[in-house]
Image (tube, grey):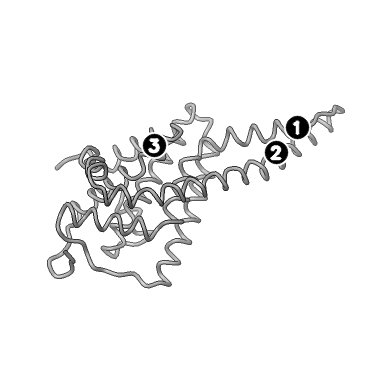
Amino acid sequence: MKIMPPFREGFTLVLGNRELRSLAILPMILGFVAFVLIYVLAVWLLGGWVAHLIGSAIGRLGGQFDASVLGRVLVAMALLFVSQAIYLGSATSIAAPIWDHMTKRIEILKFGAVPEATVSLSRTGLEIAMRITFAIFVSLVALSVSWILAGIIAAFIAGCLALCDLTSPAFARRRVLFPRQLVAAFRLPGALPFALVAGAFAYIPLLNLFMLPGLLSTATLMVARAHPASNGNERT
């Protein structure tokens, strides 16, 4: 059994197919715009709060210092450690239907079939809400440990989040939903190497943006091979 994810196969599939490339463009743009808005808003609001704390602490010592700029710089630097989690959550949530369609096309192109299982609208809404909450929680955890080993732990956490999020469309078609899907994702052959590689890309600006479609394709292939479409429940 292969323990390495099919990175080469996944990236080649996206790069070599015009339809998949076209499907990937809009979610990437929407995710990037959402990420920038969230990042700027977080720096502005949290930076002001941190600046107030710094100013209050210095004031108690009898000094005076305008920490408005320092507070926002500190927050901006700290958020870099969770930027991948923020972008991933934005991209996968805001364009979920497009990503889902893209992963279906990947399975059909590669295997000729895709599971036909459907999820109700209410369950889909609950799924998105739970995933957003989970992503926020993971981001806070990553932020709290970002100082450990120069951010290596935070990068690995971001990679684990990528594994969970990018395998979710293929798992949903197999009726494996959150939170059960989290356990199923880590049981996939190659799950740990995938998380390590995705985490390594986490803090490389722009590269993490362009790697997302290839990582999504790779994650889809991992799920499809571990859980093949059943003969009685497929579409070609």
Q: Is residue 101 left or right of residue 231?
A: right
Residue 233 percent location from the top left of the image: 18, 69
Say whether disc 2 or disc 3 marks the residue closer to the N-terminus.
2
Residue 57 percent location from the top left of the image: 78, 33
Mark 2 → mark 3, Cα distance in angstroms = 28 Å
Q: Residue at x 53, y 30 (%)?
A: 147
Q: Nearer the viewer, residue 30 or 128?
A: 30
Q: Residue at x 23, y 68 (%)?
A: 116
Mark 1 → mark 2, Cα distance in angstroms = 8 Å
Mark 3 → mark 1, Cα distance in angstroms = 33 Å
In the rendered structure, are the residues bearing label 1 and label 2 in contact, judged by CB atoms less than 8 Å apart? yes
Labelled disc at residue 199: 3
Q: Amino acid at mark 2?
A: Val
Specify the quadrant that holds the N terminus. Answer: top left
Name of the residue lying farthest toward the right: 62
Labelled disc at residue 50: 2
Residue 121 percent location from the top left of the image: 40, 72
- Report which residue position mark 1 lands on: 67
Mark 1 lies on a secondary structure that is loop
The local crowd at label 2, few if under 14, some if 14 to 19, many if 20 or more residues have their Cα within 10 Å, is many
Q: Is residue 145 left or right of residue 24?
A: right
